[in-house]
Amino acid sequence: MGMTDKAKQKVKEAVDKAGNKADDMSGNKHGEEMDKGQSRMNEGTDSMNQPQMGQQKPNQQQ
């Protein structure tokens, strides 16, 4: 696991912890919304450092 993977894992853990805390503080009234938000954040974290459609990775020759 590289440094980037470790950082992504830490971000995911923080997102999950914050989402769970917010859900607890709301009396579990917004659990589905919190879960959706956590999933979206984790998807965004997974896509970090991946080239967007039509872009190349750095150091890649044409």
Image: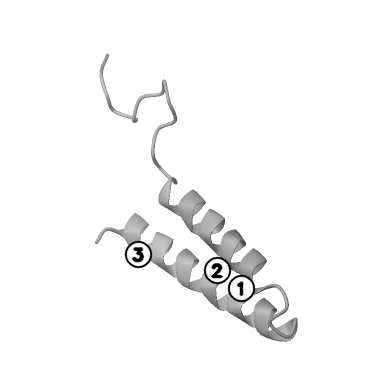
Residue matched to label 1: 19
Give the image location of residue 58, x and y in percent: 34, 30
Between residues 16 and 33, which one lies in front from this camera angle? 33
- The reply to whether callout 1 and callout 2 are in contact (CB within 8 Å) is yes
The count of marks equals 3
The image shows residue 1, relative to residue 22, as above or below, that is above
Question: Residue flagged by tag 3: what amino acid is it?
Answer: Lys
State how far apart marks 1 and 2 are (Cα). Answer: 6 Å
| Marked residue nearer the N-terminal end (2 or 3) | 3
Report how far apart the C-alphas of labels 1 and 3 lie in the structure.
Answer: 20 Å
Q: Nearer the viewer, residue 13 or 34?
A: 34
- Which element is circle 2 on? helix
Residue 35 lies, in percent from the top left, at 57, 67
Q: Which mark is residue 6?
A: 3
Circle 1 or circle 3, nearest the eye: 1
- Image point (35%, 25%), residue name: 56
In this picture, residue 17 sits left or right of residue 29? left
Answer above or below: position of 54 versus 11: above
Which secondary structure lies at badge 3?
helix
Of callouts 1 and 3, the N-terminal one: 3
The quarter of the picture where residue 41 lies is bottom right
Q: Residue at x 39, y 39 (%)?
A: 50
**Mark 2 sits on what residue?**
15
